[in-house]
Amino acid sequence: MSGDVRNIEVTYEESGARLDRWFKRKFEGVTQGQVEKFLRTGQIRVDGARAKSSTRLEPGQTVRVPPLPSKAELERAREARGRQVSDKDAAFIRNMLIYQDDDIIALSKPAGLAVQGGTNTNRHIDGMLDALSDGEHRPKLVHRLDRDTSGVLLLAKHPRAAAELGDMFRERTLKKVYWAVVAGVPAPHQGQIRSWMMKGFGPGDEKERMVPASQSDKGSQHAVTEYAVVSTAAQRAAWVALSPLTGRTHQLRFHMEEVGNAIIGDPKYPGRREPLNGVGEGLHLHARALVIPKKSGRDITLVAPLPKHMDQTFKTLGFLLEEAGTNPWDPFE
């Protein structure tokens, strides 16, 4: 650390600014995570009192500024945190970036890459997150996608953001829109799927999968999914928009198989229809968009581009992106 405690008076021109933004503008190189830590520990104060990052400053107020890390110290911390991530993986995960601000990072996860490690899984998103660290906080996963599902993956930049986003996911205030290509065409073209499901096992050596259940079954969970058909290829296949209103394991994959329209390329929930020719290889389930509500200002809408295998299938089946409208929620309206 360098420097002494300082008390700085807020000028008229600076008034009205949020405390965290004022602080980061005033002291280049200080991160949101560091500001949050200083506030939690009472090292940053306004007129001698504890304050929040969202506190609006007024002319003449005095902000207590604690000793701050030097630029050299910040750089050493970044280097230390990033050493365990190879240059190749660091470049790889940075190339996934589709959005970031002071609180969140959004990635476009490719199909086939696990979010977290496990048995025989050594390369995964969680193992690369140090490459996105600000030197103070390591980004934190706040939700998951299956290994074979592509699309928007959200990270929190600091603990406070992680807590707020966690609440949003639990309370279902974030809107999630998935795109899938399914075998056949769901009827009716728009509706809601409700069922009870529980963890089970498939035939032979097949690993864990969800199976139908009754409400009275031990471990059963109620799952609700909204769906809307965006486009069809005769009766052979359909492009479907899906929005899970509950967050159960494999919910969308299970539900589409249950209604007779299994997602193309799904080895765990394959359905009974004949395979299609000319489509891309892989699971055709894509986390297309995530809409984050804001208390003030416009909601944040995060959109991930189609993966290559689904883009190939769209071209084969004649699906056009314009058919989904400009708002991710349009198919449900």
Image: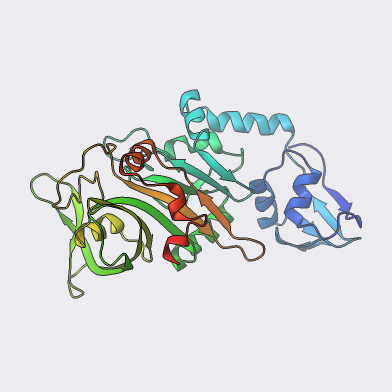
Query: Residue 164: horizontal and vertical position, in percent?
Result: 55, 61
217 lies above or below 123: below
At x 35%, y 41%, the residue is 310
Query: The N terminus lies in which quarter of the figure?
Result: top right
Please identify the residue farthest to the top as the structure is shown: 87
Question: Which residue is depicted at the point 51% across and 36% down?
Answer: 130
Q: Residue at x 42, y 65 (%)?
A: 332
- The answer to whether any part of residue 84 appears in the image is no
Residue 72 appears in the figure? yes
Q: Quadrant of residue 53?
A: bottom right
Depth check: give the residue in front, 254 or 170: 254
Residue 183 x/y as whole percent: 23, 51
In the image, is residue 245 above or below residue 145? below
Q: Residue 80: x and y, percent?
A: 57, 30
329 sits left or right of 217 in the view: right
In the image, taking residue 32 as reference, residue 239 lies left or right, namely left
